[in-house]
Image: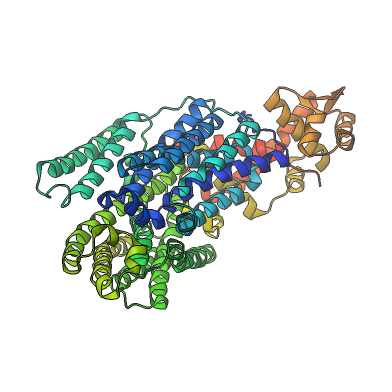
Amino acid sequence: MATATAPAVLSKRQTNIVFVAILLGMLLAALDQTIVSTALPTIVADLGGAGHMSWVVTAYLLAETVATVLAGKFGDLFGRKVVFQVSAVVFVVGSALCGVAQDMLMLVAARALQGIGGGGLMVTAMALIADVIPLRDRGRYQGALGAVFGITTVVGPTLGGLFTDHLSWRWAFYVNVPVAAVVIVMAARAIPSIRSAARPIIDYAGIGLVAGGATSMILALEWGGKEYAWTSPIILGLFAASISLFAGFVLVELRAEEPMLPMRLFGNSVFTVCSTLSFIVGFAMLGAMTFLPTYLQYVDGVSATASGVRTLPMVAGLFVTSILSGNLVSRTGRYRVFPIAGGAVMTIGLYLMSTMDASTSTWLESLYMFVLGAGIGLSMQVLTIVVQNTVPYADLGTATSGVTFFRTLGSSFGTAVFGSLYTGRLESELGGALATTGVPAATAQEPAALKALDPALAGPIIAAYADAINYVFRWVVPVALLGFLVAWFLKELPLRDSARAHATDVGEGFSPPASDDRVSQLERQISDTIRRGGVGLENVLAESGAALSPSQAWAMGQTHLHTAARGRAELPEIAGRYRMPAEVLRPAFADLCQAGYARLEGDTIHLTEAGEEQFERVWDAWRGWLDAHLDDITMTDPQDRALLDEALGKVATRLVDEQRLS
């Protein structure tokens, strides 16, 4: 029998504490993608540097993108608990520095540091779920993390507005410090230390090249037409450097032993289409969410808090269509129509938003935002599921992390392009308005001061802001239209059972960055299929021919689990896991001993040779059930088959170990 890595032995209470720590870490990292969007106008008024406004978001997203790739590998190398704690410390330091920033350059640098910590928190949070949550519950817990990731991402602007209006924009960062401190303490006390047996190979060259290429491209987009002319040597040099670095990335990935993004994935047209659409969805969602509050504060004259609340129709549209599309995909097995419809609706939503001005009513603005959110939700929910449905199982982890990587990269580019278009247009429009009205530039940069002006003076300035935002949305319409056209190339293949189980989970659509651990990803696919099949221990015992009652099988599994994890099985420790006196469980183990399958020496339980043979029977029965019922995972490729055998072995061992007393 293949020996699987022993899972952590945790009580229900310990599991819940670990999950709360992981959840808080995910919450912090996800919130800081968008919490600053409503604070940006106030930050600019306080620190200046309006031309670098989008970098407050972009720096975080870029650093997070790189950190998620590295943190997953470092977690395998040094242990996920260590990486999770170090990421939390880095996040705390970055948050504190953001709070005390005295100029825009310091704030952007601190945001990059925050992004490194945030990326580490997110990817290790997802990996820790696989380490400590029982297999049968893992899909539900990972789905909950995905939902939290999505909800905190979209409600971040409202929270940022509350802090800005009632305390200071700096508290959008200070609030992270005590919460992260709690995460660090909880992680130190509750999360078990688990390290991968295999030493990972880290593609440093590939990671460095893609990070350098993305940074060079975004700098060129940010500086072009503002800091330097588009035809200047610096801008042309940045574009050339970006193209060269991306080309170098492709060459390195073709030769790397364990590439960050295997180029063979792009031979699968479904992966290529979904990655492109994921990039466009990230581009539109984060770009719009970053600059919509700015529009609402300057043009509609609402507070920072109200600007966050006013973006909630977009959130509502996103969630409604995510839930609807997921359920329809699960029932019908048809998914191609949703990205196509999503691209069309997103294009319409962006166009409608490009028509808004100071005379547009609140209800009409809300309708336009709802339409945009609905388009994003129609596309977002199915992309990860479609990729997991079609790629070879040996590539399941890298393909899943690849799609989320492209979405995060799209968010970075979207925020940068939105910012470049916005500041470039605003400078020309606002200059004329200020010259006409004689209003000081400092007054025009402060939403509250602008609102207090005489309407005759404020009108041209407000029109300049409205025109700048409209200009941005007009230019992004072709990007969404491209997504609509690309979606037509998506092939529709029969949906695997595990993919159907994922489709109804709204958390899947948001897909927080996850480790590219292939076995872990495949384990989850298998566990979701088991959950869908509803198989129980009694069924497996009947198939195995083992002479065991359910309580004996449970006691045997617990003995094996604790022996594998700790080197010995102690009755008080097993009882402590279930928060009950040892004497309550002793009869089950005594029964196992009486049947000759174990022996009890004081409080220590050992399986006998006959007990090991019975355990093998139950294990083989689970393995046989998995082979028989996972017809959608039948593979002929030797690499895929070896990977499946490894995952099935781990799953079968955990299923025997994780049974509960009835």
Give the image location of residue 293, x and y in percent. Answer: 38, 62
Taking depth in this image into account, of 264 and 287 the one nearest to the observer is: 287
Let me know if residue 638 appears in the view.
Answer: no
224 sits left or right of 294 in the view: left
Residue at 44% x, 58% y: name it: 157
Let me know if residue 204 appears in the view.
Answer: yes
Relative to 512, say whether 262 is above or below.
above
Q: In which quarter of the image is the N terminus?
A: top right
Taking depth in this image into account, of 352 and 463 the one nearest to the observer is: 463
Taking depth in this image into account, of 29 and 535 the one nearest to the observer is: 29
Relative to 500, say whether 95 is above or below.
above
Give the image location of residue 177, x and y in percent. Answer: 52, 40
Give the image location of residue 150, x and y in percent. Answer: 49, 55
Give the image location of residue 646, x and y in percent. Answer: 55, 34
Residue at 44% x, 53% y: name it: 35
426 sits left or right of 372 in the view: left
